[in-house]
Image (tube, grey):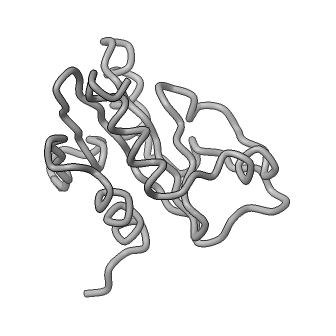
Amino acid sequence: MAVKPETTFSKGVLAHIPRDVYHMKNNNPYLSGVPDLWFSGNSADLWVEVKYLPRVPRRDSVVPTELLSKLQAQWLERRHAEGRQVAVLIGCPDGGVVLPGITWQDEISAMSFVARIQSRPALAQWIIERVNTNTR
């Protein structure tokens, strides 16, 4: 079975997460909507849905709501309303863009998307800073 680009991208980010940040990949066909990754550090946890674009957008805008299923969007909205940390991470060949909270509900121009791309180590650092107090 071929590995999906989304999985390869996730592994590239996870490679930069230290062992003191617990993480779990979620894959449950009976509970649709649960984000792909859960992180737990010494002060908080974070739920991250990962999507992947095969190429960096140059002209079109990115509409994150079109990348998520209805159940994924509902799950993220409800957990956010409960005060939990959630994010959508959109990967691409050049790195990725993190959309914290419910900012994934907003369309992103191609120019803004390109300007917000971070490397895999930088994305991992963003995650670490959300879940560990000693790195904030």
Where in the figure is residue 134, as x and y percent of width and height? Answer: 27, 25
Q: Say which quarter of the image contains residue 4.
A: bottom left
Q: Is residue 93 left or right of residue 24?
A: right
Percent coordinates x, y for residue 28 in the rendering: 16, 53
Indicate the position of residue 67 as horizontal and vertical percent values.
53, 51
Image quadrant occupied by the N terminus = bottom left
Q: Residue at x 36, y 61 (%)?
A: 10
Q: Residue at x 35, y 20 (%)?
A: 78
Q: Nearer the viewer, residue 102 or 14?
A: 14
Quadrant containing the C terminus is top left
Quick check: 60 left or right of 80? Answer: right
Residue visible at 30% across and 57% down? 14
**Image height check: is 69 above or below 101?**
below
Q: Residue furthest top?
A: 82
Left or right, 110 with respect to 15, comes to right
Q: Give the x, y percent position of residue 107.
A: 70, 38
Residue 39 placement, left or right of 10: left
For residue 49, what is the image quadrant? top left
Foreground: 29 or 52?
52
Name above or below for residue 120 compared with residue 75.
below
Residue occupying the far bottom of the picture: 1
Instruction: Please say if 68 is above or below 1.
Output: above
- Asked if residue 54 is positioned above or below residue 71 in the image, the reply reads below
Residue that sits furthest to the front in the current view: 134
Q: Nearer the viewer, residue 15 or 87?
A: 15
